[in-house]
Amino acid sequence: METILIIDDTEEIKTQLKWGMGSDYAVFLAGNYAEALAIFRKQKPKVVTLDLGLPPDEEGTTEGFRCLETMVKESPDTKVIVITGNDQRQTALRAVQSGAYDFYQKPIDLKELKVIVQRAFHLSNLERENRSLHGELEEKAGETGGMFSQCPAMQDVFATIRKIASSEASVLIIGESGTGKELVARSIHAKSLRKGHTFVPINCGAIPENLLESELFGHEKGAFTGAQSQVQGKFEFAHEGTLFLDEIAELPGNLQVKLLRFLQDKTIQRVGGREDIAVNARIIAATNIDIAKAMQDGKFREDLYYRIGVITITLPALRERGDDVVVLSNLFLGRFSREAGKNLKGFAPESLEVLRSHPWPGNVRELENVIHRAVIMSEGALITPEDLGFAEPTAKQLGKADAVTLKEVRDRAERERVLSAMDKYQGNIAKTAEELGISRPTLYDLLKKHKISYA
C-alpha cells in the first residue's frame, strides 16, 4: 500500500484526512516540524500534505516552509501538497516555487483533495518508472559503446559489430556527419582481441595535406625543414591496436597508395626513410560522402576501396530512426541533468512535437548539443521549445503539420533552426556549424538549399 504523510497541527483535520484516505493509503500523521521529519525520514512517503501553519508559528508560515524546504532538499521526488487559507494565494505560489508539487486552499473538500493526491501518486510512479527505464537504456547503451537504438536498421548494425569484432578484417563505416561512426569504431575495438591495446583516431580531413603524411606515417630526422628528430606516426602508435581513419575519402592520392601498400603487406615507411617498418594494426575507416561517386570521379582508388571495405557498415540518419529521437533525448536529458545538478522531469508536449518533426541534419551529435543547451537554459521542471533553441512560432506551426506535407514541415523547421543559429553568431560559419553539430560543408549546403544569405 502506498504511503502518505499528513502534517497538520489541527487534530480534527488529521482525523478527517486519515478517515477519508485510510482505505487507499497507509496514512501517517504529524503535528509539528520535528515529528514530521522523523516520520518522513523513516517512512519515505511518496506524497505529503502540509499545512504551513505549524507550531510554534501557527499564525505564520516559518515552520511550514522550514519543513517544506527540508523535505524537498532531502527527497526532491516527493510530492508535497501545501494546504493554505483562502487569503494566502501568494504564500501558496511561493511554496510551489520552493518545490511544492501543488497547493490546496481551505476549507478542505475531501473528494477534491483525494483527486489531487491520487494524481500526485500517479506522477510519482511515472517518474520512478521513467528513471528505471533511463537506467536500463544507459546499461544497454554501455553494452554498445554508448549507442542505443530501437530501430531495426541500428539493431542490424549492433549485430554486425558483434559478428565482426573478433576478426581482423578492415571495416568501412558509411554515414552522414554526426551519426556515430567513431562510436561504432570504438565499439568494434572494445569487443575485439585488440581491446587491451590502443585505439588511435585521426580525422584525415582536419589536417593540412602537407602535414598529413608525417602525421600518419611519421618522419625521420632531417626529412624536411624543422624535422629535428625522428617522430613516429599514428600507424606506429596503433601497433597491436586499432587505427581509425575518419573521413578517409579526404586522403590525397599519394597517401591512398601508401595506405594500400600497408593493407597489402603490413609495412610502412616514415617520411624521409627507406626502411620498411612492420606494423600490426587493424584499420577501421569512415566517410560521410558517396564513396561510389568518389571512385567514379577518380577521387578515390577502387582497389583501395575493396581493401578497406572488406566489411561495410552503413549508419542510418537520425531522421530515419523513428522514435529513437525521443529515446535518445531522454537519455541525454538524464545525463546532462545529473551533470548540472538539476531535477528536470522531462519535455513539455510541444517540445516532443518539435523533436520528432525536426530533420536533424547534424544527426545524433546535433541532438546531443541541443539537449545539452536546453538543460543549461532551462528554468522550469520541463524542457520547453525555447530551451531547445526553437522559436515558439515554429512549435505552433508544427502543431498544424497535418495541413502540409512532412517534407514541408521538416524544411520549415530546418530553415528556422539554421536562421536562429546564424543570427545568434552574426553569420559566423564556424560557430554556427558547431552550434548545429554539423560540418561547415554541410552548413554551406543548407544555406544554399534554403537560400539563406551569409555575406
Image (cartoon, rainbow, N blue to C red):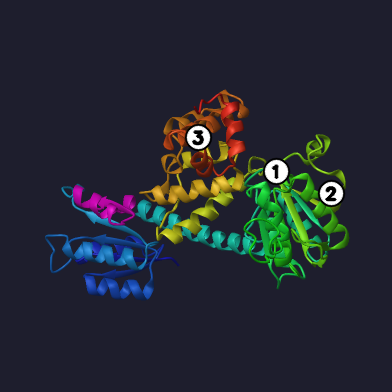
Disc 3, SS: helix
**Is label 3 or label 2 in front?**
2
Mark before the other along the chain sequence, 1 or 2: 1
The quarter of the picture where residue 63 lies is bottom left
Residue 72 in the image, given as x and y percentages of width and height: 32, 63
The quarter of the picture where residue 405 lies is top right
Distance of mark 1 from mark 2, alpha carbons? 17 Å
Read off the residue under disc 1: 288
- Note whether 277 is above or below 336 in the view shown: below
Going by the image, does 12 lie left or right of 296? left
Read off the residue under disc 2: 304
**Is label 3 or label 1 in front?**
1
Question: What range of the chain is rendered magenta?
Answer: 90-113
The one of 70 and 119 positioned closer to us in this rendering? 70
Q: Is residue 111 magenta?
A: yes
Mark before the other along the chain sequence, 3 or 2: 2
Distance of mark 3 from mark 1, alpha carbons? 22 Å
Read off the residue under disc 3: 417
Label 3 is placed on what type of residue? Arg
Residue 285 in the image, given as x and y percentages of width and height: 74, 53
Task: Mark 3: give few (<14), some (14-19) or many (20+) Cα within 10 Å.
Answer: some
